[in-house]
Image (cartoon, grey):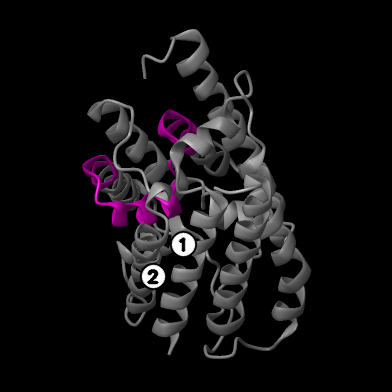
């Protein structure tokens, strides 16, 4: 059942990205280009998505457990450490270089373009590299 | 896109929020794409199938978009191969080191009012703004 839940979530997530225009790197870069013809669309996407989440998630997390799983997997960490900031900084550089982040890149694979395959392969390599250098969690 | 791209942006955002909430209420999981994919690269018992299913859902959604609205999917990117590969590496490694990307920190983290996620989002927005400014306005589109 969890597999079907995740499949549906990914599907709707992708349609949302597409409807919002966020599967197109040029739209993402138009938001990131403050000195150019700035396009606020990405901000509205983020506001709509996180705003809805903010309205509903607290009530969901009040429940003892999810509908179809034994428990919630949600971190309660609140500290801001160097790894968080360094990782986010590197992520932003990569995002700014071509205008792709993980979700739109995976959705974009369906377009069949070789550049998208290259990006996703490199992204997976970067994630794999992280599992090599990561210290075991305490 | 037709009349107002900004309206579509808001509606698309709401759809993304709904998909993320659905994963939380039904499966108890955060809809963070880099976390879901990264976790699949180092799977624990019984933890792999749902991750692959989510990724499959993303690609299947892409296939639907390709049929309904082909212009939403890029055929190619206006960058050289080495730049695309470097960007992918930085996005993959950085998202894992920083504990999330635009979906996990952006949508779900901000949506839970997490101070970690707010710090991450502000940080990657700033480095992305600077990167685009350098690439487009200082180096003149060399990247």
x 33%, y 39%: residue = B89
Residue A43 position by quadrant: top right
B11 vs B113, left or right, is: left
Asked if the stretch drawn in magenta spans residue A91, the answer is yes
Which chain is mark 1 on?
A
Query: Which residue is labeled 1 in the image?
Result: A14
Q: Which secondary structure type mostly characterizes the magenta part of the structure?
A: helix
**Cα gap from disc 2 to disc 1, whole angstroms:** 8 Å
Q: Position of residue B117 (x, y in %)?
A: 64, 50
Asked if the stretch drawn in magenta spans residue A88, the answer is no
Tell whether label 1 touches label 2 (CB within 8 Å).
yes
B101 vs B11, left or right, is: left
Q: Is residue A57 visible?
A: yes
Residue A114 position by quadrant: top left
x 34%, y 82%: residue = B46
x 54%, y 61%: residue = A16
Q: Position of residue A35 (x, y in %)?
A: 62, 18
Query: Which residue is labeled 2 in the image?
Result: B57
Q: Which residues are magenta?
A: A90-118
């Amino acid at each position: 059942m969890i597999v079907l839940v995740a499949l549906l979530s990914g599907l709707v997530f992708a349609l949302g990205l597409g409807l919002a225009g966020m599967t197109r790197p040029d739209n993402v870069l138009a938001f990131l280009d403050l000195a150019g013809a700035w396009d606020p669309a990405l901000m509205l996407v983020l506001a709509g998505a996180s705003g809805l989440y903010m309205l509903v998630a607290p009530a969901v997390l009040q429940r003892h457990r999810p509908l179809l799983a034994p428990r919630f997997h949600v971190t309660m960490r609140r500290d801001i450490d160097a790894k968080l900031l360094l990782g986010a900084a590197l992520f932003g550089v990569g995002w700014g270089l071509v205008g792709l982040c993980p979700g739109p890149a995976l959705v974009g694979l369906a377009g069949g373009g070789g550049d998208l395959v290259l990006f996703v392969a490199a992204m997976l390599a970067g994630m794999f590299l992280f599992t090599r250098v990561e210290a075991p969690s305490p | 896109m037709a009349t107002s791209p900004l309206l579509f942006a808001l509606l698309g955002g709401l759809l993304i929020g709904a998909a993320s909430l659905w994963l939380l209420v039904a499966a108890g999981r955060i809809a963070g794409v880099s976390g879901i994919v990264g976790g699949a690269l180092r799977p624990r018992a019984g933890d792999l199938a749902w991750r692959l299913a989510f990724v499959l859902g993303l690609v299947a959604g892409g296939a639907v978009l390709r049929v309904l609205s082909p212009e939403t999917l890029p055929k190619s990117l206006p960058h050289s191969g080495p730049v695309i590969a470097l960007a992918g590496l930085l996005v993959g490694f950085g998202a894992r080191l920083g504990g999330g990307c635009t979906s996990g920190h952006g949508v779900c983290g901000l949506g839970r009012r997490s101070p970690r996620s707010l710090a991450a989002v502000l940080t990657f927005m700033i480095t992305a703004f600077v990167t685009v400014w350098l690439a487009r306005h200082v180096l003149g589109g060399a990247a």
